[in-house]
Image (tube, rainbow, N blue to C red):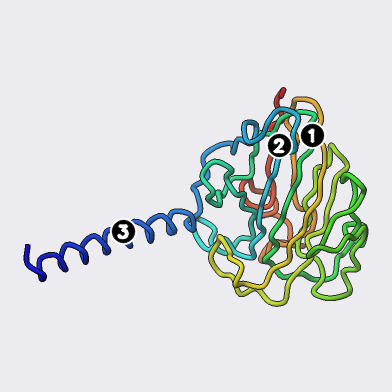
Amino acid sequence: MSKGGRLAVVLVAFLVVAGLVVFGVAQLLVPGVPGGVVNFTDTQAAGQPVHLTVQTVGSIGFGNHPTWVSYLVKNPHTGKWDHDTSWELPANTVIDMTVYQYDSGSPLRNQEWGQVQGTIGRDATLNGKSFKVYDSYTGNGVGHTFAIPALNLSVPMVGVAGNPCAVAPCHFNSPHNIETFSFKTPGPGSYNWQCFVPCALGYLFGNGGAMSTQNYMGGELEVVAS
């Protein structure tokens, strides 16, 4: 084969490999389509903590309601950010939760939502620092809460400056806070979780819309026997 022919073969091979890499990265960045329950029951050995990672965004950027605020969850099997808020978890198991908070905030109407409740240790961490209550009149306020009423669990999601991320999933180059906390699942059953901070722009008192819609600011924990 001539030198030019060998060069052409190498170039084609390089382009194929580069294309596969780009495709693989793109698959991780494109959010999954809502379609059921994300399963976390087989991601760890029996009795070991489950790692659950979510992010909150100021606008989902796609679908029927592109401007709605939303939660997304990182699928433990695919690594993709899924727009699904129903999660299957093992019963009587510690859940170590990480929240990437990309949305802005404001002072709370009810300061009680600024308290951390129901977590293991009765605290959470904000960018690595432990806290039990957040004063929403400081910094950038509070954007959302992650709350499971049946477990008396509620954690405020501290806001960031502005809201530069327009299309989910958001990434580390956008301003964000990282919050972590742990809780223990109860026995088998279905447990509602939701945001209690009114954040639905265009709706009376900030309620309705995303606040009352599955796969946006609320979901279900489907707890099954481990």
Q: Position of residue 180 (x, y in %)?
A: 78, 54
Q: Which amino acid does label 2 sit on?
A: Leu
Rendered image: mark on residue 221:
2
Residue at 79%, 37% in the rendered image: 94
Q: Is mark 1 on a helix, strand or loop?
A: loop
Q: Position of residue 178 (x, y in %)?
A: 73, 62
- Image quadrant holding the N terminus, namely bottom left
Q: Decide which of 11, 134 is in the foreground and name it.
A: 11
Dot 1 surroundings within 10 Å: few (below 14), some, or many (20 or more)? Answer: many
Mark nearer the N terminus (2 vs 1): 1
Q: What residue type is labelled 3?
A: Val
As displayed, is residue 92 above or below residue 121?
above
In whole angstroms, how far apart are the C-alphas of marks 2 and 1? 9 Å
Residue at 56%, 52% in the rendered image: 81
Is the Cβ of the residue at disc 2 closer than 8 Å to that at disc 1? yes
Mark nearer the N terminus (3 vs 1): 3
Q: Is residue 199 left or right of residue 138?
A: left
Q: In this view, does 35 lie to the left or right of 127?
A: left
Question: Viewer-nearest of labels 3 and 1?
Answer: 3
Mark nearer the N terminus (3 vs 2): 3
Residue position marked by numbered label 3 in the rendering: 17
Residue at 83%, 53% in the rendered image: 155
Residue at 69%, 33% in the rendered image: 89
Question: Viewer-nearest of labels 3 and 2?
Answer: 3
Rendered image: mark on residue 185:
1
Q: Where is residue 26 in the image (x, y as percent from the top left)?
A: 43, 59
